[in-house]
Structures are given as C-alpha cells and as structure tokens.
Amino acid sequence: MSVWLIMLGMGIVTYLSRLSLIASIGRISVPPVMQRALRFVPPAVLTAIIFPELLRPGGNLDLSLGNLRLAAGIVAVVVAWRSKNVLLTIAVGMAALWILMALTLR
Amino acid sequence: MSEFAAGVKGVVPILLGVIPFGMIYGVLAISAGLSPAEAQAMSAIVFAGSAQFVGAQLFRLGTPGAIIILTTFVVNLRHMLYSASLAPYLKHLSWRWKALLAYLLTDEAYAVAITRYNRASQSPPLPADLHWYFFGAGLCLWLTWQASTMVGIVLGAQIPTGWALDFTLALTFIALVVPALKDRPSLAAALTAGIVAVAAGGLPYRLGLMAAALCGIVAGLLLETLQAPAHEPEQEGAP
C-alpha cells in the first residue's frame, strides 16, 4: 500500500470517529464499558511505544548500563513526574542523551 | 466581539503548547523517511497530533498499512467521546457545518469549545452563532498546526541523523503519559502495555503494539472493576 493510501485511510478513520455522534444524534450512544475503556487508551498505546524504544533500541532487549536511551529515558520519567512540563521533559531527556553519547564517544 | 473572534482569542493560550508539537512532528516525519509533501499532507489529512506521531513511528518501522490504519483508529477512538459530548449543541446545524466542525474536532478544539458551550448553557437560551466560536478556535488551531509542521519539516531536513532526534518521540510520550498516571488502574494499563510490547516485539507486522495496547486497556479495566466492587457501571444513570 502506498504512503498516500495509508494516510488517506488514517484520515478516514479519524474523521469518522469525530463525525460519528455529531452526525447520528440520538440514534447511537457510546456503551458504558467503552467509555471506561477509552480512559486507558492513551497510557496503554503511548507506553507500548515508549518501552520498546527504551528497552530494545537496537531491536534486541538491552537492560545494560550501556543502553543510553534507557538511561536518558529514566531521567525524562523523573523530570516528567516532578515537573509535569512537556517541553522541559523533552529538553532534559534530549540533553541527557547527547551528554551520554558525548561521554561514551558514540 | 463576534463569536468567531472570541473563539480565536480563546484558543491563543493553547497555541503555545501546539506549536512545538507541530514542529517535533515535522522533524520526526522527515527522520521517519516521509517526503516533505507526505509529512505536510498527513497534518492536513489526519490532523491529530498523537496519531501522527504514532503514524510517523510506524512508517519508520516499515509497518503494513492496515496495521497503521488500525492503530490510528484505536489512538483516535477518544474523539467519539468528544463527538458525543458536543452533539447536542450542534444538532440544529446543517450537515455542512457538522461535516466541517467534525474535521476540526481535535483535543484542543474540544477543550475550548466545550468550555464555551457549558458556560453558555448556564444562561439559556444559547446564542444562535455559538458554532462560530468552535469554528474560530478550530480554524486557528488548524492553521497553527500546518504552519508549525512546515517549520518542523524544514528543520528536520537540515538536522543530521547523528543527533538522534527520533528519540524526541519517546520523550514526548513520556512527558504526556507520566503525569497522567494518577491512579492504579491507569498505572496498571501503562505497565502491562509496556511489558507486553517489549515481550511481543518479535511479532510479525508490528502487531505487538496493538496486542500490547489491548492488554493494557483490559488490565486497566479489570483493576478498576476490582477496586470498586460496589460500583455498577452498567446501571443506567451511573456516572
């Protein structure tokens, strides 16, 4: 499938979820169990991306001290937890990775 | 002041948070191998920050199209809740207005619009031109998103790959997730999804992400149900 077709598909599913209940007032409602489940979608999906990025940076599980992305990621988790500031978290996490890369000459 | 101008004014404080995300998306999309035209088009066609971040990542990993679309669907399901919440205020509008406002219904536009609608519904009747507020806020967000994407694309094309800027994806998600883990069910959802994603990293077609997300959602639901045994969510009128 070409990139353009995939993007069109992404656009259609996004648009339909936005239009769904605006267009069908009174005929359909969101089931309660789904309303509860939706709250867990962002933490589940985003963490499912974060963990492999930190723990399998080269494709294989790497829990060693030499895994710079894991170390920088832990720094970012602490900053995010303490500051709740998105841009600060990105800046400190990126700086941590660059410093570690410079220290280990990578 | 017209409702349109009020909507623009209402969204301005949020733009400061939107601009860096648009730029980071642009940089990421280029480092994921999308062409500048494709990266920009995704901002116009999909127009949903987190889904575009995830999409760019999945493109980078060479994921099959069907999985990318399915993942986008799951990531954007929350828009159904926004759609349900705004529907009563939009029911009198023509289908053209509904079609247009649905396209502009992002997290930020929802937050701004629902605040205005809630305020207006405290002193009925509602002004007839309130949808112009939503439109003003949504259009302003749309233009800002497209412009900041463009800046990110230009920057991304000039930054060498040795800078490891793809790491901003993980960092952005960490910054969004960690402060939201306020209770045990959401913490359980996140940890379950993360562990399953690492364990299922070898699954074909990048299905690990999907499997991990579903396991996380179920874990969160289960723990929430166990924590509140007296609560009957299926009952009518329950919160």
Image (cartoon, coloured by chain):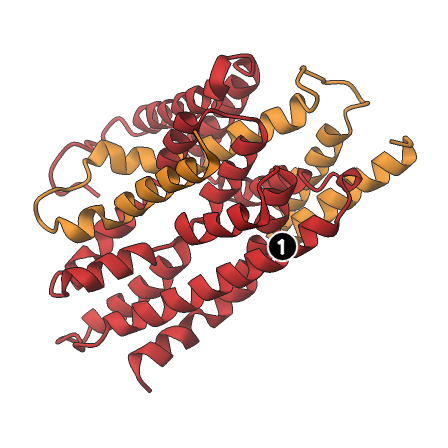
In this orientation, which residue lies closer to the viewer: B95 or B91? B95
Q: Is residue B181 visible?
A: yes
Q: Is residue B125 above or below residue B105?
A: below
- Chain A: what color? orange
- Quarter holding the N terminus of chain A is top left
Residue B150 locus on image (x, y percent): 58, 58
What is the secondary structure assignment of the residue under circle 1? Answer: helix
Residue on which disc 1 sits: B152
Going 73% across and 31% down the picture, which residue do you hit? A69
Write down the chain letter for disc 1: B
Q: Does A10 sit left or right of B238 as displayed?
A: right
The quarter of the picture where residue B11 lies is bottom left
Q: Is residue B107 above or below residue A48?
A: below
- Chain B: what color? red
The quarter of the picture where residue B33 lies is top right
Q: Is residue A85 visible?
A: no
Q: Does B134 sit left or right of B180 as displayed?
A: left
Q: Residue furthest left?
A: A27
Residue A49 locus on image (x, y percent): 54, 30
